């Protein structure tokens, strides 16, 4: 499984409809400060179901909608589609390409789609659960997070690595089984 494409409109600084193609392997996004690099990773996190405006570096969810500039009017909605290659069927769904779409309006109303079919947030969470890519996964490490990991206590750090390695769920299950 790998990220193939991101289609953005109205999300943060992306007023213009923008498509970003990712190739298999490593992709680096470079650009001056404030040019929107982190907005791309915020977008990936958001389309995967992030519900916290704070972790998207905003005060409220509306802050992710393009707020306007000197030359452009604000937009009324933000929409993002993340297309994934699923040839290896890493995600448990019978498609070799999966697109996940999220749209939000200023009213706060959110819409979710999997392969253009309307769905619930819960379906998005379930699709990515245990895939290493979900909202709670450590596949996205934000700016400042590395420092946080390095400065945390060794026991806390261990939990982070166990969670990233996918060991935590087995440990939790083992504990539950032992209690029975
Ligand atoms: P750095 O190199 O400093 O990390 P960056 O390339 O990661 O920079 P971002 O943080 O992605 O930059 O982008 C910040 C820019 O996005 C700011 O100019 C900010 O004004 C703009 N921005 C954020 N939210 C919105 C919004 N809702 N509407 C318009 N512009 C926005
Ligand atoms: Mg940044």
Image: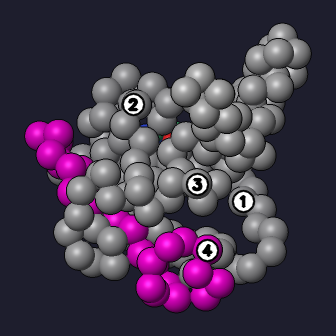
Q: Residue 149: name its quadrant.
A: top right
**The residue at label 3 has a CB less than 8 Å from ligand 2:** no
Residue indicated by mark 4: 90
- Residue at 44% of width from left, 85% of height from top? 94
Q: How many marks?
A: 4
Whichever of labels 2 and 1 marks the residue nearer the N terminus, that label is 1
Report the side of 136 relative to 65 (left or right).
right
Whichever of labels 4 and 3 marks the residue nearer the N terminus, that label is 4
- Residue at 68% of width from left, 42% of height from top? 170
Q: Is residue 172 above or below residue 97?
A: above
Residue indicated by mark 3: 130
Counting from the top left corner in percent of width and height, residue 17 is at: 38, 70
The label nearer to you, 3 versus 2, is 3
**Residues shaded magenta:** 87-112
Whichever of labels 2 and 4 marks the residue nearer the N terminus, that label is 2
**Secondary-structure class at tag 3:** loop
What's the CA distance linking mark 2 and mark 4?
A: 29 Å
Residue indicated by mark 2: 53
What's the CA distance linking mark 1 and mark 3?
A: 27 Å
Q: Quadrant of the C terminus?
A: top right
Residue indicated by mark 1: 29
């Amino acid at each position: 499984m790998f990220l193939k494409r991101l289609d953005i409109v109205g999300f943060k600084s992306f007023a213009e409809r923008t498509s970003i193609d990712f190739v298999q392997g490593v992709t680096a996004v470079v650009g001056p400060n404030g040019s929107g690099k982190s907005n791309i990773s915020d977008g990936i996190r958001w389309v995967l179901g992030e519900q916290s405006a704070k972790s998207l570096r905003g005060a409220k969810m509306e802050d992710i909608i393009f707020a306007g500039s000197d030359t452009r009017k604000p937009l009324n909605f933000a929409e993002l589609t993340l297309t994934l290659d699923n040839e290896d069927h890493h995600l448990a769904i019978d498609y070799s390409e999966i697109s996940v779409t999220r749209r939000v309006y200023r009213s706060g109303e959110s819409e979710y789609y999997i392969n253009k079919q309307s769905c619930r947030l819960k379906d998005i969470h379930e699709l990515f659960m245990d895939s290493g890519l979900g909202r709670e996964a450590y596949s996205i490490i934000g700016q400042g997070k590395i420092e946080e990991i390095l400065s945390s206590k060794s026991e806390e750090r261990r939990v982070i690595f166990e969670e990233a390695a996918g060991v935590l769920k087995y440990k939790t299950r083992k504990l539950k089984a032992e209690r029975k």
